């Protein structure tokens, strides 16, 4: 039997205003199992920074929780866009690669500012967890803290060191863990550890998530426990998260999603997803982000996507828009048609490189030729909105030839969708723990086991922001020039400069990967 005294407070730690779907789903799940348990959602994403501590105190004083569920979404900030402390990639590259001492100095200053803001956020969040727990214990000495969310799943080993003894640190989905915490059951089988009491098991992150079938989130209930819900209803441009499945079966060398969510894809029943969208729709929401690691993870899930989109149409919600991460190798003309009809108006394809040879080496399982064919189908179906194409240069074995191939590929995508519709998002991989790329870095002695993946100290950050020599400095210079020419259109500038310097390959070369038997470096790592 559950302990009826449980009072659960969900604290979403400060974050850019992204809908806090994680805590919404957790509280919905708990409510369905334990309708008598009192719950409250408190979202620091909707509070101005100067008020964080005060607002947290007030929420605890009012609710007097026995269980504090802290949800921490993101920590890592390497991105080509302006982050919370400036443009991290630009600062880092100016510092590492600029020849002009003034620009180098500016990069160093920017890097310092960024490091300061990174560590301030880190310490601030850890401080909020400690503060919240201490305050809750004034009212309920038995109060306990549990932390989880995307950031904790990636850095669970490191974060535990700075958290109060007794804090439960959770990896991946939290539904099953919260169930046990509420029932007061033993946590030994869960993907978690308790600070000061247990240590994370080896390969904890590789353990399978619990197989729970998701039902439509009950927003009538959610709005009763979340007074600030309306904050997300006000801005009609906002994309509210809806999950349609969990898990990704692929093995892309740098990706940790497949580890966090597991390789087994678990589909949320289409009727339940539609029922959830309907509740948001009735509250005025028209923009949805399908938060799946991949909306169509493999061909065998095409039918599920078709079923969902058909049901959205049947439900008469014909004025919505949606966006998602899409593996564009898994489309059919029917699915393309449905995507357009249901209002998909943005998607991201993470092909990483336009060279089939590299895509294979990175173990991404993409057939680039099929991606192009499917994109043509999507265009023919009437897709006229933006597609963001994520490229990460210099992951492994990049050469001038493979760069030329990526340009050829990108230009072909532009021919299909229109140059103004294809946005090249140039990322450099932020190396993450528990990935195949991390093992590769150990093997190549670029990193030593025991390194701190959360460190932003220049000597570590330089390795974690993956851009190894011999091409590292070359890309550094290209990016610096691109920012100088037009920092508002960084991705397109990078492509243009690369093409000016190196030219463009024949598309057929990009699409053909020579079969290599001896060069299986990444495969060997696994
Ligand atoms: C969809 C997605 C996006 C979308 C979000 C769209 C939207 N409107 O919601 C977009 C593209 C906008 C996006 C952007 C970014 N993202 Co993102 N994103 C994801 C993704 C794929 C899914 C997140 C999600 O919503 N899942 C569904 C919900 C239900 O799950 P959830 O919130 O994680 O909650 C579950 C569990 O985490 C857990 N849980 C959550 N809280 C708690 C608390 C406790 C106590 C417990 C026990 C459990 C628990 O239980 C929940 C239910 O099962 C994840 C990767 C992944 N597969 O998880 C990355 C991820 C969250 N993103 C990440 C990052 C870094 C970003 C960016 C900052 C990238 C960048 N540098 O620009 C940006 C900006 C975000 C911002 N705050 O401004 C990282 C965060 C970790 C990190 N490395 O720091 C992740 C984990 C990817 C990664 N491995 O790097 N993202
Ligand atoms: S397909 Fe996407 S989510 Fe899946 S492993 Fe590859 S990069 Fe990760």
Image (tube, grey):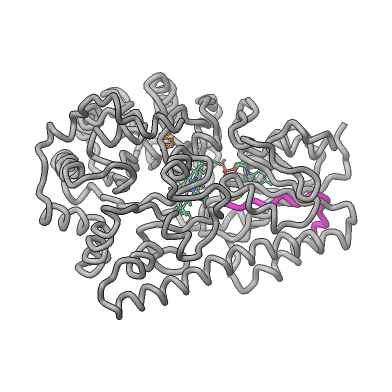
**Which residue occupies the foreground of this view, 47 or 91?**
91
Residue at 62%, 25% in the rendered image: 213
Q: Is residue 331 visible?
A: yes
378 displayed left or right of 294? left
Q: Is residue 221 visible?
A: no
Q: Is residue 512 above or below residue 163?
A: above
Residue at 80%, 57% in the rendered image: 63
Q: How many marks?
A: 0
Is residue 333 shown in magenta?
A: no
Residue at 12%, 56% in the rendered image: 501
Question: Looking at the picture, how far across and down is residue 297, in whole percent?
Answer: 42, 28
**Which residue occupies the foreground of this view, 320 or 463?**
463
Q: Is residue 298 above or below residue 171?
A: above
325 displayed left or right of 121? left
Quarter location, residue 373? top left
Quarter location, residue 387? top left
Residue range highlighted in magenta: 63-74
Is residue 64 shown in magenta?
A: yes
Residue at 60%, 37% in the rendered image: 205
Quadrant hosting ligand 2: top left
Question: Looking at the picture, how far across and down is residue 440, in whole percent?
Answer: 43, 40
Q: Is residue 272 above or below residue 194?
A: above
């Amino acid at each position: 039997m559950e302990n009826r005294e449980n009072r659960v407070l969900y604290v979403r730690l400060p974050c850019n205003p992204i809908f806090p779907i994680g805590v919404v789903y957790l509280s919905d799940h708990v409510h369905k199992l334990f309708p008598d348990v009192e719950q409250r959602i408190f979202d620091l994403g909707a509070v101005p920074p100067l008020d964080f501590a005060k607002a947290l105190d007030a929420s605890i004083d009012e609710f007097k929780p026995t269980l504090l569920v802290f949800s921490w979404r993101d920590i890592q900030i390497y991105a080509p866009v302006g982050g919370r402390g400036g443009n991290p990639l630009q600062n880092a590259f100016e510092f590492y690669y600029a020849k002009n001492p003034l620009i180098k100095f500016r990069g160093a200053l920017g890097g310092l500012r960024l490091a300061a803001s990174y560590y301030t956020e880190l310490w601030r969040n850890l401080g909020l967890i400690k503060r919240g727990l201490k305050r809750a214990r004034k009212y309920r000495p038995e109060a306990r803290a549990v932390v989880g969310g995307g950031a904790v799943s990636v850095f669970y080993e490191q974060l535990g060191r700075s958290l109060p003894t007794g804090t439960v640190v959770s990896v991946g989905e939290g539904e099953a863990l919260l169930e046990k915490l509420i029932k007061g059951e033993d946590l030994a089988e869960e993907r978690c550890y308790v600070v000061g009491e247990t240590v994370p098991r080896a390969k904890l992150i590789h353990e399978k998530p619990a197989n729970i079938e998701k039902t439509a989130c009950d927003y009538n209930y959610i709005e009763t426990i979340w007074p600030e819900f309306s904050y997300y209803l006000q801005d009609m441009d906002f994309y509210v998260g809806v999950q349609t499945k969990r898990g990704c079966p692929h093995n892309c060398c740098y990706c940790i999603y497949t580890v966090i969510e597991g390789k087994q894809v678990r589909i949320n029943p289409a009727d339940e997803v539609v029922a959830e969208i309907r509740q948001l729709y009735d509250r005025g929401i028209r923009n949805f982000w399908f938060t799946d690691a991949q909306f169509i993870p493999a061909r065998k899930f095409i039918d599920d996507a078709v079923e969902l989109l058909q049901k959205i149409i049947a439900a008469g919600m014909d004025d919505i828009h949606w966006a998602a991460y899409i593996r564009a190798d898994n489309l059919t003309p029917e699915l393309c048609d449905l995507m357009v009809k249901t209002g998909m108006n943005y998607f991201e394809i993470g092909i990483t490189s336009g060279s089939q040879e590299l895509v294979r080496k990175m173990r991404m399982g993409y057939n680039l030729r099929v991606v192009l064919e499917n994109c043509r189908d999507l265009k023919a179906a009437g897709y006229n909105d933006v597609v963001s194409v994520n490229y990460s240069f210099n992951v492994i074995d990049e050469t001038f030839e493979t760069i030329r191939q990526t340009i050829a590929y990108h230009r072909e995508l532009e021919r299909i969708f229109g140059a103004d519709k294809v946005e090249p998002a140039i990322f450099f991989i932020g190396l993450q723990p528990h990935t195949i790329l991390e093992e590769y870095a150990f093997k190549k002695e670029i990193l030593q086991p025991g390194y701190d993946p959360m460190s932003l100290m220049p000597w570590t950050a330089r390795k974690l922001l993956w851009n190894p020599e011999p091409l590292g400095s070359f890309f550094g210079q290209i990016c610096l020039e691109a920012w100088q020419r037009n920092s508002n259109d960084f991705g397109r500038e990078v492509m243009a400069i690369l093409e000016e310097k190196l030219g463009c390959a024949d598309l057929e070369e990009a699409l053909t990967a020579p079969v290599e038997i001896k060069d299986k470096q990444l495969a060997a790592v696994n």
